[in-house]
Structures are given as C-alpha cells and as structure tokens.
C-alpha cells in the first residue's frame, strides 16, 4: 500500500503475466510495489483470475492479449511504461513445440521487447532468464554450489537452453543503448533454478503419474545428485526487488546476471518433489534407481524415437527423454549472495513456508489422494 507521502506513479508491464511465474509476479507487484499506478499484464492467453484484479482499486490492472513475436503488439504494450518485466517464454523440454517456435518466442520475442523499449523510451528491462543458460551442459559436468562467476563450460544443444542463452545475451548487450529521449537502457537478467510452487505443471504431472501407479513413483535418479530448486514466490520477489532497485543502482546492476535462489534444500529432483508429494500420500520406491542408467537412457531414447515416429499423428510427450534424464542426473546447484549484495535480496518465504504452501496446493489438486 502507498504510504501517505507516496503517490503511485509507475507503470509496469509484465509479459507472460498469466503464466506460472508471471501470475506470482503480478500478484507480488500488487502486494508489494507501493509506487505502482498501472500494471499491464501481457500474454498470449489471458487467464480468468485477471478479472478479479481488474476491479477498481489503487492500481489499474490492464490486461493485454498479445504475442511477443509481433513487434507492433509489443511496442503498443510497452509505450508509456517505466519498467518491463519480460517473463513470457516458451518453456518446453518435452518436445511439445518445434525448435523454430521456441526460437521465435524466446529469441525474436525478446528482441522485440528490447526494440520496443528503445523506440518508446522505456528505460528499465528485467529479463527472466534461466539456470539453463549455464547448465547442466551436454557433457554432464557437475556444477556444485557455484555462483555467477564460477567457470563452467556452457554447451547446449537443446532448443530451449539455446534460446534462453541467446535471449539473455541480447538483453545484456542492450544495456546502455540509448532509448528514445536519449537516456540509457538499463537491463539485467535473473536466472532461476528449477522453480516449484503453486501452479507448477510438472509437479502436477508427477502427482498424476503417482496416482496412476497406485500412489507410487519409481526412483530413476540417484539420491546423491543435487538439483537446484527455488520457490516461485521468492523468484517473484526477486523480480519485484530488481525492478524497484534498477533505477537507483543502474551502474551496479545494469548488464548483470543473478541466479535466483533461496533456502530450499539441496536434493535430487525426485527427493525434492517428495517433500511435497510424500505428505500428499505418494511414495518413492527404491533407495537407488530401480533401473541402471544405461537402460533408462535406452528407454528415454525409445521415447524420443516414438515421439518422432508418431508426430504426424499424435503428440507423444513423456516426461522421460534423453534430455530430461540427463538434466535430472547431473548435479547443478548454486551458492551465491550476489543478489543480496547488489540489491538486498533475502528470500521472502522460508523453506518451511514454501513447503507448506506447495503441499497445500498439491492437496487441493483434483483427483487428490489426500
Ligand atoms: N519453470 C521453471 O522452472 C523456470 C522457468 N524459467 C523462465 O521463466 C519464465 C516463465 O516460465 P513459466 O512460468 O515456468 O512458464 P509458463 O509457460 O507457465 O509461462 C509462460 C507464459 O508466457 C506466455 N507466452 C508464451 N508465448 C507467448 C507469446 N508468444 N506471447 C506472449 N506470451 C507468451 C504463456 O502464455 C505463459 O503464460 C520463462 O521465461 C522461463 O524460461 C526460468 C527458469 C526456470
Ligand atoms: C528422469 C525422470 C524420472 O523421474 C525425471 C525427469 C525430471 C525432468 C522432467 C526435470 C529435471 C530437471 C528439470 C528442469 C530443470 O529444473 C531446469 C529447468 C529450467 C527452466 O528454465 C525450465 C524448466 C527446466 C528445464 C526443468 C524442466 C523439467 C526437468 C527437465
């Protein structure tokens, strides 16, 4: 809420504001950005929950149905905004979208956002990048408690990380370009670890898979492999803070990247999911992977082959493919305080609270075993 001395003046635009992360950013801005006058929510598909936010209140919420690949639609939405949080993206590692579509949305879409800021004189751009810009790489090298300066051979082949890496580069290189009116564009990129929390589709998929197998999930990843995770509320909070601080700390923060992290424990992907699915009645079978890695890779490759064979007829997109298996089997965790040093980030939600909120959400899912 605005204090007595604060007159809300700022206009924010959130692209992808109806997605899993986008919704949390939108709600967080409304709760915790007192200087906000108007919040523009731009998305290809507008969600029904936006309606309740559009009712008269201290902040005008404007829903804009649009496509980031359409430069004119982006420019119209950006015009007159002070800050753009560009979180729209095509997130796909299961083969639901073509490489071309992923590139178009993630790279061309980001280029359109940058050019729109330049054309319309919008000075501050926050980009949701991804840990995937760094790794895990195709060689399966571990990244153990690394930070933004840890050397790592970032080599990608999959369309999604390739597109995020290219888009991040565009955003960082645009820092300092002159926007209409002559002021410099200030950009920075946030690289979330694997996000979890209310609304997480893959968590929902694992839960439904567990229900189909009589409440059981079967271990495929050794418990010793650590996969970094971060709660969606903390990712949203980091976006709000960066957007708020970018003006005052432009010299320090402009052109920088920040991993998005919190106090979520370092665990394997499956053991971490069990923190939520366990209390909802699911069990993870096996203390070690039930099948050897080579056999899992064979099955994953068969899945990829089936996907290719079936694609003219149906979309076959199982969770297990060579890429997801390699991702889940490679340690990738961060330990950094760069965001704290540069803009005072501290997680808003403790691990206990993040866990409780996520469990509560899983329990409320349809078909719950709870
Ligand atoms: N889910 C995760 O674990 C992580 C996600 N990220 C990044 O966070 C961002 C948000 O991801 P999620 O919320 O998980 O995905 P999501 O798929 O739930 O949200 C993406 C949103 O972008 C919108 N969108 C897609 N194409 C669009 C287009 N052409 N024009 C306008 N809007 C479009 C979608 O409709 C959707 O609402 C993405 O940029 C993603 O790369 C980064 C790290 C981890
Ligand atoms: C082998 C399977 C048996 O249970 C487990 C498969 C799990 C995978 C579906 C996930 C493992 C790692 C995830 C990715 C990771 O958290 C990083 C990501 C960052 C992003 O920017 C987007 C999402 C994702 C690619 C995430 C997707 C799901 C996994 C591959």
Image: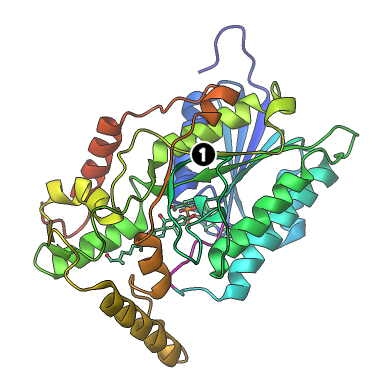
Question: Quick one: label 1, few (<14), some, or many (20+) residues within 10 Å?
Answer: some
Q: Is residue 237 above or below residue 369?
A: above
Q: Could you say which is closer to the camera, residue 103 or residue 264?
A: 264
Q: Identify which residue is drawn at 20% across, 73% down.
A: 291
Q: Residue furthest right?
A: 182
Q: Is residue 348 above or below residue 118?
A: above
Q: How many marks?
A: 1
Q: Is residue 185 magenta?
A: no
**In this picture, which residue range is highlighted in magenta?**
89-94
Q: Secondary structure at mark 1?
A: loop
The residue beneath circle 1 is: 147
Give left or right: position of 54 versus 109. left
Give left or right: position of 152 versus 49. right
Q: Identify which residue is drawn at 37% across, 40% down.
A: 231
Residue 256, position in %: x, y?
66, 37
> Is the image coloured rainbow, by chain, by secondary structure, or in one colour?
rainbow
Q: Could you say which is closer to the camera, residue 332 or residue 195?
A: 332
Q: Could you say which is closer to the camera, residue 235 or residue 42?
A: 235
């Amino acid at each position: 809420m605005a204090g007595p001395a604060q007159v809300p003046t700022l206009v924010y635009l959130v692209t992808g504001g109806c997605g899993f992360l986008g919704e949390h950013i939108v709600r967080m801005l409304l709760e915790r950005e007192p200087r906000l006058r108007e919040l523009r929510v731009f998305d290809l598909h507008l969600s029904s929950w936006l309606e309740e936010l559009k009712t008269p209140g201290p902040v005008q919420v404007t829903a804009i149905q649009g496509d980031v690949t359409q430069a004119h639609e982006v420019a119209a939405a950006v015009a007159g905004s002070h800050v753009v949080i560009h979180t729209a993206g095509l997130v796909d590692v299961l083969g639901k979208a073509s490489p071309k579509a992923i590139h178009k949305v993630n790279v061309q879409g980001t280029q359109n956002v940058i050019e729109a800021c330049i054309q319309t004189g919008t000075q501050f751009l926050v980009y949701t990048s991804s840990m995937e810009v760094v790794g895990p790489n195709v060689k399966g090298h571990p990244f153990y408690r690394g930070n933004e300066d840890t050397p790592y051979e970032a080599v990608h082949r999959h369309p999604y990380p390739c597109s995020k890496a290219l888009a991040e580069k565009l955003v960082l290189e645009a820092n300092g370009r002159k926007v209409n009116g002559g002021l410099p564009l200030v950009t920075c990129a946030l690289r979330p670890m694997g996000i979890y929390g209310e609304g997480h589709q893959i968590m929902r998929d694992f839960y439904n898979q567990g229900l189909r197998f009589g409440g059981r999930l079967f271990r495929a990843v050794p418990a010793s492999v650590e996969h970094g995770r971060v709660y969606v509320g903390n990712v949203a909070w980091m976006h709000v803070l960066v957007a708020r601080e970018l003006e005052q700390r432009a010299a320090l923060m402009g052109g920088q990247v920040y991993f998005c992290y919190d106090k979520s424990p370092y665990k394997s992907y499956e053991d971490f999911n069990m923190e939520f699915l366990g209390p909802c009645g699911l069990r993870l079978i096996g203390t070690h992977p039930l099948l050897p890695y080579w056999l899992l890779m064979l099955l994953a490759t068969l899945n990829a082959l089936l996907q290719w064979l079936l694609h003219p007829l149906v979309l076959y997109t199982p969770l297990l493919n060579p890429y997801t298996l390699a991702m889940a089997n490679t340690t990738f965790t961060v330990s950094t305080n760069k965001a704290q040093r540069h803009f005072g980030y501290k997680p808003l939600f403790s691990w206990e609270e993040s866990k409780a909120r996520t469990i509560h959400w899983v329990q409320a899912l349809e078909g719950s075993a709870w």
